[in-house]
Amino acid sequence: MKKNIFSGILLGIAAFFVTFGVAEISFPESFLTFTDQDWLIDIWPKAYRYNIHVGVGAVIVACGFIIPAYFIAKDFATKALEMLCRFGIGGMFIFASIFKIQDPHQFATLVAQYQFFSALHLDFLNNFFALIYPQFEFWFGLAMIFTPFVRESAFAIFWMFISFIIALAWALANDLGITCGCFELEGAQDKAEAWTSLIRDLILIWPTLWLAFRKDRSIIGIWKKK
């Protein structure tokens, strides 16, 4: 029991750093971030440009807590990590889908700015993609949290991450300076933001792949004795 408690504390700290890291990478102006603080920018005017470095650093620090937590209580840590990953990734995809479902026209405009389908002479897919993809994000995000079908949900989300990575790599290769469009629909931004989104997706794809190999069971079922 003591090992589980200690492992749980370490995982709680790790979860905080992962949340903080992802916020720094994806939401640099939210209440969870540090590099956008006025007092810090007054001291260091370029601080906000290093949010990606701080975010990746926070994720690395989180790994430093996860590893000992796992070796202290392997069974408990594995179950806790599965639960945290399902809530985190599933919740993120549900949140990401809301803006796109509410404004499919704007999302279609952002998709078109990637010029990916245009290069293939398949412009009609921009609207189709804008209508269908957010639904996939929403329903598979829900399934990840509220159904036992974690493997199927994670597998689908894994391939969505692959598509995001391909799209962002395409944008960077063609110097388009497009944001991911995952959490906002502002369209073309700074090229650095595409790198930020790409790094975030490259980080999050690994726990998603891990979930794809877990047993199908509900969140509650994770804690049931075999």
Image (cartoon, rainbow, N blue to C red):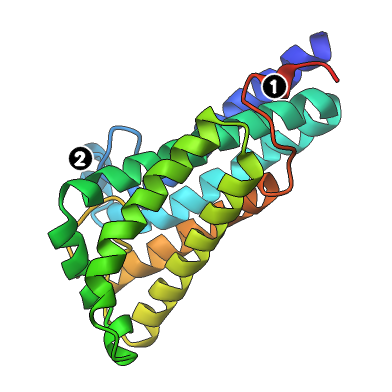
> Of label 2 and label 1, which has the lower sequence position?
2
Disc sitting over residue 98 in the figure: none
* Disc 1 target residue: 221
Instruction: Say which of 75 and 132 sits in front.
Output: 132
Count the marks.
Answer: 2
Q: Quadrant of residue 5?
A: top right
Please give the residue where the numbered disc 2 appears in the rendered image. Answer: 38
| Direction from residue 83 to residue 107 in the image, left or right | left
Element assignment for label 1: helix
Q: Who's the residue at 54% across and 38% down the image?
A: 144
Residue 156 figure quarter: bottom right
Residue 19: give x, y in percent of width and height: 47, 36
In-front residue for pair 5/49? 5
118 with respect to 105 (left or right): right
The quarter of the picture where the N terminus appears is top right
Q: Residue at x 62, y 32 (%)?
A: 148
For disc 2, the neighbor class at 10 Å (few under 14, some 14 to 19, many from 20) is few
Q: CA distance from mark 2 to mark 1?
A: 45 Å
Q: Is residue 40 left or right of residue 14?
A: left
